[in-house]
Amino acid sequence: MSAVASSPYSLLGLAREALRGHAGWRPAWRSTASPKARYRVVVVGGGGHGLSTAYHLAVEHGISDVAVIEKGPIGLGNVGRNTTIVRSNYFAAENVRFYEHSLKLWERFEQTHGFNAMVSQRGTLNLFHSDGQRDLFARRANQMRIEGVECEVLDRAAVKRLAPLIELDDTRFPVLGGFLQRRGGTVRHDAVPWAYARSASARGVDIVEHCEVTGVRVDAGRVTGVETTRGTVAADKVVLCVAGDSSRLAAMAGFRLPMETHVLQAFVTEAVKPCLDIVVTYGAGHFYVSQSDKGGLVFGGPTDGHNSYAQRGNLPVVEEVLSAGATLMPRLKRLRVLRQWGGVMDMSMDGNPIVSATPVENLYLNGGWCYGGFKAVPAGGLCTAHLVATGTPHSLAAHFGLTRFREGRTIDERGVGPYPWAH
């Protein structure tokens, strides 16, 4: 993957435009007003995975006759509605390999695309509060080391040095230590689709914004295109990268998916001076937090319990998340929460993604990412593009096939058994 040849966002380019009153900036990507009548590949969904798929189709496989169709503006879906965390500290060996490859792509993301995505490898710290949790993290650490991925198990003193805000001696959930991956961190979420859109557009991909897919055309078990609010678009192959809307699009094509749609909320506080230079995950409650470059603390928790397609949340989960944060870091009680938002999550029945062919010939799915979609954007697009171009799964994502649910090969990532409620 070669870098974009000449970036207008270089130091020289920025200085030049500053002297010109910023009058010379051009759109970062071509937003096609109307799609062509036919494409070799249509990617439904202009989020991280859709744009990454289109980019890798053009770069890795020379397929640029591609349209990315997005019902709204680029970057306003889940890719711009997350807590920006990237990591590869997984338990299942196949998942470690996949997410580690994705993390390596993040490490050279800015050089590849010539775009500042504020990649910050500040480290991710998972806390444990019992002997059982310590054993589980030790198992995870050992599995990661077997796969050649570095990690550390920390004692209480080391945790306190890394994150002084943490209350170690809570009477219910004392912190016994932590599990650290120093190469994990955060990436500016909205910069990711902008970078991919720019790179894909520069290679001939059409990006069609404000164009909603209203139907999937199937003839004799084979996909032939999509119906949109701007007319019918024929295609040799169609890829669904629509996150929480995966079930709706699959229904349009005539089949059901083993997933549910839930809302995942996120929050940001008022800006404060630097006080947390690492990503922290609470082991006694579903709470994770980091500090943004603007000073606000960005945090989230569990999904809302009910099924929903709304990009907003409910108050009981707000209370649960804020309570967990105040328990872990009591000083957070002094901060005001400025914003809250929700993403529409596609939760699969084993908590792992689906990158797969479907029962409809030449119709492919990238979905079911649950909590892990953002960190997987680079490798997810790479593997989806490989599947679409070659017709065979990429070795990194072969275990994400849809048929695993029918064949009883579900992925036990959390070490608690293949139970849908356990993830």
Image (tube, helix red, strand yellow):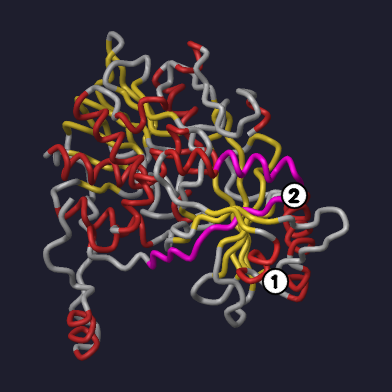
Q: Position of residue 143 (x, y in %)?
A: 50, 38
Name the side, left or right, on which 173 lies relative to 76. Answer: right
- The quarter of the rendered structure image containing the C terminus is top right
Figure check: 170 above or below 146: below
The residue at the point 51 percent across, 76 percent down is 294
Q: Which of 94 and 357 is in front in this view?
A: 94
Q: Answer with left or right where residue 17 lies relative to residue 296.
A: left
Q: Which stretch appears magenta?
A: 118-140
What residue is disc 2 on? 284
Q: Is residue 263 magenta?
A: no
Query: Residue 217, position in %: x, y?
Result: 31, 21
Mark 1 residue type = Leu
Crowding at mark 1 (Cα within 10 Å: few <14, some 14-19, many 20+): some
Residue drawn 35% across and 55% down? 106
Vertical placement of 185 versus 317: above or below? below
Residue 95 drawn at (x, y percent): 45, 36
Residue placed farthest to the top in the image?
220
Q: Quadrant of residue 161?
A: bottom right
The quarter of the picture where residue 54 lies is: top left
Indicate which disc residue 27 carries: none
On the image, the x and y values in percent for residue 254 come to 42, 16
Q: Does the magenta stretch include residue 126?
A: yes
* Element type at mark 2: loop
Above or below, comparing residue 402 to residue 49 in the picture: above
Query: What is the C-alpha distance between the residues marked 1 and 2?
Result: 16 Å
Which is nearer the eye, 103 or 203? Answer: 103
Residue 94: image quadrant is: top left
- Type of residue at label 2? Ala
User: What residue does disc 1 label?
Assistant: 165
Helix or strand or loop: what does disc 1 sit on?
loop
Disc on the earlier residue, 1 or 2: 1
